[in-house]
Image: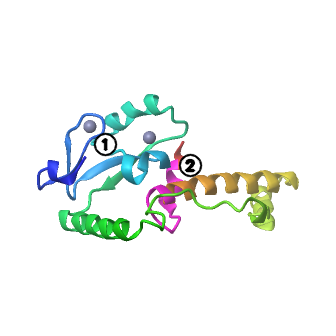
């Protein structure tokens, strides 16, 4: 929707119920990166409104992320910046949210846990020893949730994976 159709206080309208989401107000967005692509991003006024788009989008492993709308000044500055970039960017690809690169062969399949510490923990808790296969399973698990966290950070346009990127994953 073009910005000029909205009044001065409105950042976006809710993708489900069309209620306005105000500048600097709280809103929700979808954790799935395809729901946050620049041109077709979804914005929700509430978790129930977020819920409503899920069956339609057939999400697996999705959740609502709370976000804060920018101030009007910030938003307009962003828009202006985007326009000047797209104007000059006929040849260069336009700004878009892409999945992080996955150089499949080059990602090391290393052990990601401190084996001695894990074994010591299990020993102290239970007196049990730990078979070496456990380390591999846990390393794989860490890789998997890291990949999801990377997606979350990408969806939020960040270059830093943060604790909150994992929190949503681990809560489930
Ligand atoms: Zn709504
Ligand atoms: Zn979604």
Q: Quadrant of residue 86?
A: bottom left
| Disc 1 from disc 2: Cα separation | 23 Å
Numbered mark located on residue 44 in the image: 1
Name the residue located 76 percent from the left edge and 61 percent from the top edge. 118
Numbered mark located on residue 84 in the image: none
Q: Nearer the viewer, mark 1 or mark 2?
A: 1
Mark 2 Cα within 10 Å, few/some/many (few <14, many 20+)? Answer: few
- Residue 21: % across, % down: 22, 48
Q: Is residue 167 above or below residue 90?
A: above
Q: Quadrant of residue 45?
A: top left
The first of marks 1 and 2 along the sequence is 1
Which colouring convention does the figure follow?
rainbow
Viewer-closest of 58 and 28: 58
- Residue 153: % across, % down: 50, 60
Viewer-closest of 84 and 106: 84
In the rendered picture of this protein, how many numbered marks are placed on residues?
A: 2
Q: Mark 1 near ligand 1 (CB under 8 Å)?
A: yes
Name the residue located 77 percent from the left edge and 56 percent from the top edge. 122
Instruction: Describe residue 61's horizontal placement relative to residue 131 as left or right.
Output: left
Q: Is residue 158 magenta?
A: yes
Name the residue located 32 percent from the left edge and 45 percent from the top edge. 43
Q: Secondary structure at mark 1?
A: loop
Can the viewer see residue 18 in this picture? yes
Q: Secondary structure at mark 2?
A: helix
What residue is disc 2 on?
A: 170
Q: Is residue 73 magenta?
A: no
Magenta highlight range: 154-168
Q: Quadrant of ligand 1?
A: top left
Q: Mark 2 near ligand 2 (CB under 8 Å)?
A: no
- Residue 101: % across, % down: 62, 61
Q: Is residue 114 above or below residue 60?
A: below
Is mark 1 in CB contact (under 8 Å) with mark 2? no
């Amino acid at each position: 929707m073009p910005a000029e159709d909205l009044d001065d206080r409105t950042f976006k309208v809710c993708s489900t119920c069309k209620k306005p989401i105000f500048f600097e107000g709280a809103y929700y967005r979808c954790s799935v990166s395809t729901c946050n692509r620049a041109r077709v991003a979804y914005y929700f006024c509430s978790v129930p409104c977020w819920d409503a788009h899920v069956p339609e989008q057939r999400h697996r492993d999705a959740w609502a992320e709370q976000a804060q709308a920018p101030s009007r000044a910030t938003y307009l500055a962003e828009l202006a910046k985007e326009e000047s970039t797209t104007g000059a960017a006929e040849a260069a690809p336009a700004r878009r949210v892409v999945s992080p690169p996955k150089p499949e062969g080059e990602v090391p399949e290393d052990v990601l846990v401190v084996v001695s510490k894990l074994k010591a923990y299990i020993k102290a808790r239970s007196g049990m020893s730990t078979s070496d296969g456990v380390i591999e399973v846990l390393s794989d698990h860490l890789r998997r949730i890291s990949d999801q966290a990377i997606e979350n950070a990408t969806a939020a346009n960040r270059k830093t994976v943060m604790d909150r990127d994992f929190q949503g994953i681990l809560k489930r």
